[in-house]
Image (cartoon, coloured by chain):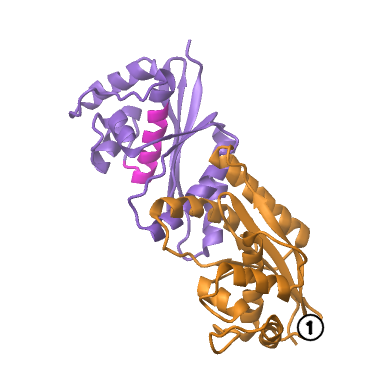
Chain colours: A purple, B orange
């Protein structure tokens, strides 16, 4: 018996912070809610950070996730942009300090959702939309956050650094969904 | 007539965050309180960030500064360490989001306090201790935070990117204090 779990995935950024809540309940995966918190570029940075923190805190209060997931720290950016990103990441981490946090690197997230660790951003977004039955377009930060939450639901069960597809090949959304469902222990 | 002002200077770090409150009241500069917030290296990062945020929030609630000052973003670190520093800086900025924030670059802070933009860390610490009459040793993060607060009090009045000493020469603590007092519009 796999316990029900509700995960908040977060993709922080100083301008746009994506978030997505995905749950496994009654043997099914379901997108509960998702969106972006946008800070106003004209606001001073402390106010922008407060916007991000308050937005994510409201998501936690409203949707009551019991776990949080985020991309691991990466270091291919410049130090200056890393510091600005770090500020947003800091207040995002603060907003979920009451929850267990799990982090995954970018290629694991891509591979879990799309079958390839080198998938294009657009491919990840398309797979997330299809897998979770999202209607219409969604900002990339939002689908990225949902991809992180999905990744955690897959890895949470297996306990190992599982990947959905053994080979880095393109899969149909249906095949991918079946693979994710299998790993996450839910009905496809 | 220069209004009374109480400044909180912050030197954020993921392990140790220095803070110092300095006020100008009744024509005098005075260190109100200072210290460091230490996070526990064994704690998960969200908890460490919460420790920093709660510590600084308590300082704001207790000492009621009306302005905040911090070092400007700098970029000579690696991207990975900049991201970790950014996280601490983010929650520090959040803790002072209700206050006007002023930032100064490192060489301005050093020059304001010690007379030289290239002063050694130890020299800055010694000058701060002497200028504010601190007894005994203090962690470098604490004296750095006080140096930032002092810098703001000097620049706040003049409105210009003032430096205390026109030439980058060593000054005695007494001379430096006189120069700071002159710039900050207080009695030496």
Residue A111, x across and y down, in percent: 28, 31
* Snapshot quadrant of residue A184: top left
The residue shown at (44%, 23%) is A156
The numbered mark 1 sits on a residue in which chain? B
**Observer-nearest of A67 and A29:** A67
Q: Is residue B185 above or below residue B76?
A: below
Q: Which residues are magenta?
A: A137-152
- A21 displayed left or right of B24: left
Residue B107, x across and y down, in percent: 51, 75
- B121 displayed left or right of A159: right
Is A147 magenta? The answer is yes
Label 1 secondary element? loop
- Within 10 Å of disc 1 (Cα), the crowding (few <14, some 14-19, many 20+) is some
* Snapshot quadrant of residue A10: top left
The residue shown at (67%, 83%) is B172
**Observer-nearest of A63 and B173:** B173
Q: Is residue B34 above or below residue A110?
A: below
In this figure, which residue is indicated by the disc labeled 1? B27
**Observer-nearest of B44 and B67:** B44
Q: Is residue A124 visible?
A: yes
Residue A46, x across and y down, in percent: 56, 60
* Snapshot quadrant of residue B155: bottom right
Residue A59, x across and y down, in percent: 54, 40
- A24 displayed left or right of A162: right
Q: Is residue A130 visible?
A: no
Q: Quadrant of the C terminus of chain A?
A: top left
The secondary structure that dominates the magenta segment is: helix
The residue shown at (39%, 29%) is A150
């Amino acid at each position: 018996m796999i316990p029900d779990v509700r995960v908040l995935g977060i993709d922080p950024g100083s301008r746009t912070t994506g978030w997505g809540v995905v749950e496994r309940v009654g043997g099914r995966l379901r997108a509960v809610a998702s969106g972006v918190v946008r800070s106003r570029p004209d606001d001073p940075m402390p106010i922008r950070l407060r916007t991000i923190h308050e937005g994510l805190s409201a998501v936690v209060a409203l949707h009551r996730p019991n776990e949080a997931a985020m991309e691991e720290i990466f270091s291919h950016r410049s130090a200056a942009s890393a510091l600005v990103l770090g500020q947003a990441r800091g207040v995002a981490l603060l907003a979920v300090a009451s929850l267990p946090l799990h982090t995954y690197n970018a290629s694991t997230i891509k591979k879990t959702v799309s079958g390839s660790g080198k998938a294009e951003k657009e491919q990840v977004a398309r797979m997330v939309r299809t897998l979770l039955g999202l209607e219409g377009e969604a900002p990339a930060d939002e689908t990225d956050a949902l991809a992180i939450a999905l990744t955690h639901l897959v890895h949470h069960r297996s306990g190992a650094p599982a990947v959905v597809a053994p080979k880095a090949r393109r899969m149909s959304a249906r095949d991918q969904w079946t693979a994710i469902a299998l790993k996450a222990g839910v009905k496809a």
